[in-house]
Amino acid sequence: MAERVAIILAAGISKRMNTLLPKVLHEVCGRPMLAYVLDACRKVGVVNIYVVVGFGNEQIKERFGQLKDTVWVLQEQQKGTAHAVLCCKEYLKDFEGQTLVLCGDGPLIRADTLKTLVEKHESDQPAATLATAVLNDPAGYGRIIRDAKGNIRGIVEDSDCTSKQLAIKEVNPSYYIFNNKVLFDAVQNVKPDNVKKEFYLTDVVSGIIAAGHKVLAVTAVRPDEARGVNSRVQLAAANKIMQRRIQQELMDNGVTIVDPDNTWIDIRAKIGQDTVIEPFTYIHGEVKIGQGCRIGPFAYLRHGTVLQNDVVLGVFTEVKNSTLADGVRARHHSYIGDAIVGRNVNVGAGSITANFDGKRVNRTNIGNDCYIGSGAVLIAPLDLKDGSQISAGTVVSQESIDKLGRKEQKD
Ligand code: UD1
Ligand code: MG
């Protein structure tokens, strides 16, 4: 088996997104788009990933940090996708293996599809293989041009298509694998002969064919993963598709989602068997929910929330960076932030942890079997012993608890 690397193109300015943030850092269900593409590459055994960055490259590098398998390659001027690949030449000119080329703005990519692509390339041994998709609405994508025998002849960008070519429904989702030497020979010959005057990677395909090599195109990409993200509208559409996938997997794992269309769950969330998620629940960030919990309706769970088993969180309950042990109940209008809540604690309606004193975020510890009456304000930092009873409407500070303790000792 040949050694394999990947190039991910992520340097574009992305005029259509109208953004100051590099496009590939925009998030889909809680993760930057680029993270999905990196992960998919890793699942098909690449040894190194070359990510071409340009616009906002510092931000991208800061977000991802130093990754062991990743080289950040700078494309100073964004002259097109072929030029972006050419920027990797100094790293890859002598590499004898296979090179996958993918776009950083394709977060819907599935590793299984990449596997199909790679296997086809391994078994048929062409110079290049690309995976294509058939879309009912192909507008905006490069069209796959085939000859009468069905062999691929090239790719024509949407803006360069004739009206006849515009009707072609088979498109290029930008999933390619090349024999590396062939790729770098062809990419340096690409000319900016197109409406946008850019160096197009798509022209490499016809270049390789013209040089007498074989190129294969397999229709292996499902419509729901072919969609690239070039605009905010497409970003929202990608979020919807990914959300459906996340929920599908959770449901397959035994989680009930009462109303999938009105529930939003971050890809990083983990949810245990027989937990029920009621409508209008929003789960954002790394959140872990155990088994048999009941969440929502209208619950908001934020980064760092850990719910053990049989926890019940009801309407307008927000939890952040807190661990709630088995059997905790907070059924109505509560905020629990930066807290550790012990087993079987009942948090009454409208009770909150006042965790921010204007300068610092402080922690609250609530022992096992405590009862927090309705409308209690727990001023952090605060430590409540096991079995503490807090009356409804009380404002509790550590000072007041300590005083009470001293008074009880005197009595
Ligand atoms: C590209 C393909 C098109 C395909 C579509 C799939 C080309 C010419 N077109 O079009 O056939 O249907 O993807 O989504 O390849 N980039 C760079 N440097 C550059 C220009 C772009 O790194 O100089 C990066 C972008 O950041 C982006 C990717 O390459 O991640 C693709 O560029 P984009 O402008 O989004 O191309 P599309 O018009 O989507
Ligand atoms: Mg794109």
Image (tube, rainbow, N blue to C red):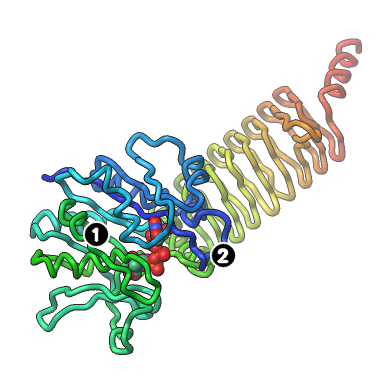
Residue drawn at x 17%, y 73% as measured from the top left: 152
Q: Nearer the viewer, residue 269 or 25?
A: 25
Residue 339 appears left or right of 122: right
Residue 156 appears left or right of 24: left
Q: Closer to the camera: disc 2 or disc 1?
A: 1
- Residue 289 percent coordinates (x, y): 52, 43
Residue drawn at x 30%, y 73% as measured from the top left: 171
- Residue 92 percent coordinates (x, y): 23, 45
Say if residue 105 shows up in the picture.
no
Task: Indicate which disc, 2 or 1, sits on the residue closer to the N terminus.
Answer: 2
Q: Is mark 2 within 8 Å of ligand 1?
A: no
- Residue 224's quadrant in the figure? bottom left
Task: Report the residue marked by disc 1.
Answer: 187
The span from disc 2 to disc 1 (Cα, nearest Å) is: 29 Å
Specify few, some or many for label 1: CA neighbours under 10 Å numbering under 14, 14-19, or 20 or more.
many
> Label for residue 316?
none
The C terminus lies in quadrant: top right
Residue at far bottom of view: 163
Task: Report the residue marked by disc 2.
Answer: 18
Residue drawn at x 35%, y 40% as measured from the top left: 70
Q: Say what amino acid the circle numbered 2 marks.
A: Asn
Q: Are marks 2 and 1 in contact (CB under 8 Å)?
A: no
Residue 8 vertical placement versus 370 (above, below): below
- Residue 11 percent coordinates (x, y): 43, 54
- Residue 389's quadrant in the figure? top right
Q: Ligand 1: give its quadrant.
A: bottom left
